Amino acid sequence: MRETQFDKMEETIYIIDTCVFVKEGFFFDNGRIHISPYSVIEEVKSPEASIRLDCIERQRSVEFMQPKKEFIEEAKNLEKKIKAKGSLSRTDLDIIALA
């Protein structure tokens, strides 16, 4: 397993969703930790959002990762408990699983 930028850090981790890349004006503070699931990349469709995503990736401002399967299953169980089955996207479930 490769080491990530937050393996040895004890600070707040910000989990970001697709809207960060779609909307203009989000400021990435490189002193903070931002993570996002890979499924966010698949949701970015507009040329503007793709450019933002590419720039942020190149600056290494966000660490993209896949949540563990066990946490995805927990997220799906939570979805069932709140009777929202099918109303959450794969990315929504991945975001919950990372949290």
Image (cartoon, rainbow, N blue to C red):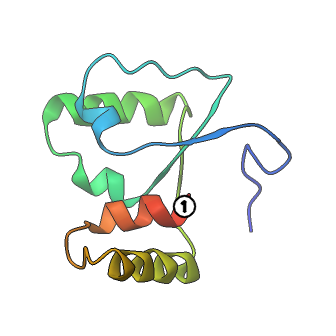
Splitting the image into 4 quarters, where does residue 29 fall?
top right
- Total residue callouts: 1
In the displayed structure image, the side of residue 20 where residue 61 appears, left or right = right
Residue at the spot x=40%, y=27% of the render? Answer: 55
Res. 86 image quadrant: bottom left
- Reading the image, the residue beneath label 1 is 98
Residue in the picture at 51% in, 67% down: 97
Is residue 94 shown above or below 71? above
Residue lying at 73% horizontally and 43% vertically, measured from the top left: 5
Quadrant hosting residue 30: top right
Image quadrant holding the N terminus, namely: bottom right
Where residue 70 sits in the image (x, y, percent)?
57, 83
The crowd level at tag 1 (other Cα within 10 Å; few <14, some 14-19, many 20+) is some
Q: Amino acid at mark 1?
A: Leu
- Left or right: 25, with 15 as reference point: left
**Residue visible at 33% across and 61% down?**
91
